Amino acid sequence: MSTSLLKPSARLQELLPNLLDSAQLSGDPYLQFRLNDDITAMLSMDDVSEALLVRSEHITALPNMAESVIGLMSSRDSVFGVVDLPHTLGYPASLGSTRQYQVIVVNIKPNQLIDNNSSAPRDAFSDVTLLGFAVPQIDGIKRLEADQLQPMDESELPELRQYTSGYVTEPDLTEPDLKAVLIDLQRIMRLPIFNQLAN
């Protein structure tokens, strides 16, 4: 596998041009994407390395792994795992056999990966730096002020609430009540599947 397999036009700078020349804009940048037709989500750009369109033949399948693990890919001279993020979070598999994947590559810090049997970070993860989240659709960059974040209601999306730090209501004229949940990367990293990928 090689980074050259990924077209430069598919990289974050091309996929998300509004991130560039953004120094004059207020608020913190978040990458907005879809978990499914009904749920919009966001990740802090502090956690995002790049966003890629990856052809399926450039992801190598792994045997004896969870169904939500798509395989291994490479970018920027690094090889890392790719998972179906919605399926990992408990939603039905929806990506299926596709010709290309929209992949969010996130930066994983050693202290974000926790042994399930301990509250301390695992030294075994010290060399883990990247992970790919395949999602149905990447929408682009949104900027949020801190006061826009609201806590999740206990009755809303109970299966997802444990992986979020709140939500924002999007000021979209076509969807005035659209809510986007903010994914907490560190909480996701505590899922057993990521221990499996790292071993």
Image (cartoon, rainbow, N blue to C red):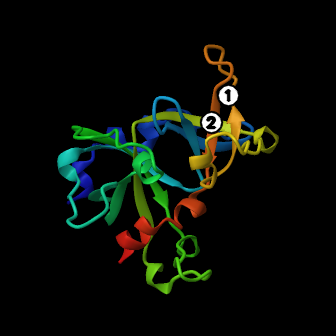
Q: Is residue 44 visible?
A: no
Q: Of all residues shown, which one is farthest toward the right? A: 147
Which image quadrant for residue 114? Answer: bottom right
Question: What's the amino acid at mark 1?
Answer: Glu
- The residue indicated by pointer 1 is 170
Which residue is drawn at the image coordinates 43% and 78% (left, top)? 127
Quarter holding the C terminus is bottom left
Q: CA distance from mark 2 to mark 1?
A: 7 Å
Query: What is the x, y in percent for residue 122?
Result: 51, 83
Question: What's the amino acid at mark 2?
Answer: Ala
Residue 152 vs residue 17, the one in the foreground: 152
- The residue indicated by pointer 2 is 180
Q: Of all residues shown, which one is farthest toward the top? A: 174
Query: What is the x, y in percent for residue 23?
Result: 67, 41
CB of mark 2 within 8 Å of CB of mark 1?
yes
Query: What is the x, y in percent for residue 69?
Result: 32, 57
Q: How many marks?
A: 2
Label 2 vs 1, first from the N-terminus: 1
Image position of 43 (left or right of 66): right
Q: Of all residues shown, which one is farthest toward the left? A: 57
Which residue is drawn at the image coordinates 52% and 77% (left, top)? 116
Q: Is residue 197 above or below residue 133?
A: below
Which residue is drawn at the image coordinates 27% and 47% (left, top)? 6
Q: Of all residues shown, which one is farthest toward the bottom? A: 123
Quick one: label 2, few (<14), some, or many (20+) residues within 10 Å? Answer: some
Label drawn at residue 125: none
Q: Is residue 120 visible?
A: yes
| SS category of the residue bearing label 2 | strand
Query: What is the x, y in percent for residue 27?
Result: 73, 41
Image position of 196 (left or right of 30): left
Quick one: label 1, few (<14), some, or many (20+) residues within 10 Å? Answer: some
Q: Is residue 141 above or below residue 51?
A: above
